[in-house]
Image (tube, rainbow, N blue to C red):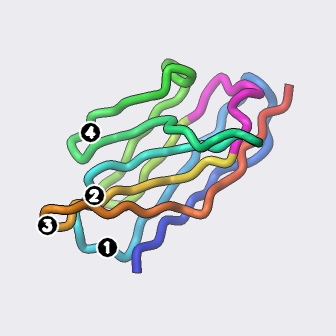
């Protein structure tokens, strides 16, 4: 069974940094993309950053220059380094992985980790 376990969330002051981690286990298929999403209070979930199997990255405009997504294939782990945090970054952050299974795709979600940025 595929499991995604996130860690690294917490409370930080504006201007501070956090690093989120997501460890993926239980799949024998290739990871197609690994992503971080977030859901602020009262708002819809939104894509924050994505990294492809080849290492290509993409970011939401609101986090460009402040957040960095990376992965360690040997550890089946994806990271999100968040610098210069703002109160608007407060949200539950979710890890998402898409696997390529033959000609189809399957995606899985972590349980979420709370990030709170105080002003």
Image spot of residue 75 (x, y percent): 37, 61
For label 3, the SS is: loop
* Segment tinted magenta in the rendering: 82-91
Cα–Cα span, label 2 and label 1 = 9 Å
Pointers 2 and 3 in contact (CB under 8 A)?
A: no
Q: Is residue 70 above or below residue 17?
A: below
Pointers 2 and 1 in contact (CB under 8 A)?
A: yes
Image spot of residue 62 (x, y percent): 56, 21
Q: Residue furthest right?
A: 119
Image spot of residue 48 (x, y percent): 51, 35
Say which quarter of the image contains residue 49.
top left
- First in residue order: circle 3 vs circle 1: 1
Residue behind mark 2:
31
For label 4, the SS is: loop
Residue behind mark 3:
102
Q: Is residue 83 magenta?
A: yes
Say which quarter of the image contains residue 55.
top left
Image spot of residue 54 (x, y percent): 21, 42
The residue shown at (34%, 40%) is: 51
The residue shown at (61%, 47%) is: 93
Cα–Cα span, label 4 and label 1 = 20 Å
- First in residue order: circle 2 vs circle 4: 2
Horizontally, is 104 left or right of 77 in the view? left
Residue behind mark 4:
55
């Amino acid at each position: 069974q595929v499991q995604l376990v996130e860690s690294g969330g917490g409370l930080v002051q504006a201007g501070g940094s956090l690093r989120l981690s997501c460890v993926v286990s239980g799949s024998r298929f290739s990871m197609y993309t690994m992503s971080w999403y977030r859901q602020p209070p009262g708002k819809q979930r939104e894509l924050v950053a994505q990294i492809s199997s080849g290492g290509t990255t993409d970011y939401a405009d609101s986090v460009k220059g402040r957040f960095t997504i990376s992965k360690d294939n040997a550890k089946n782990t994806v990271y999100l380094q968040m610098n210069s945090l703002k109160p608007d970054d407060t949200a539950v952050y979710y890890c998402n992985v898409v696997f390529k299974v033959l000609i189809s795709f399957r995606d899985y979600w972590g349980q979420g980790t709370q990030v709170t940025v105080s002003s």
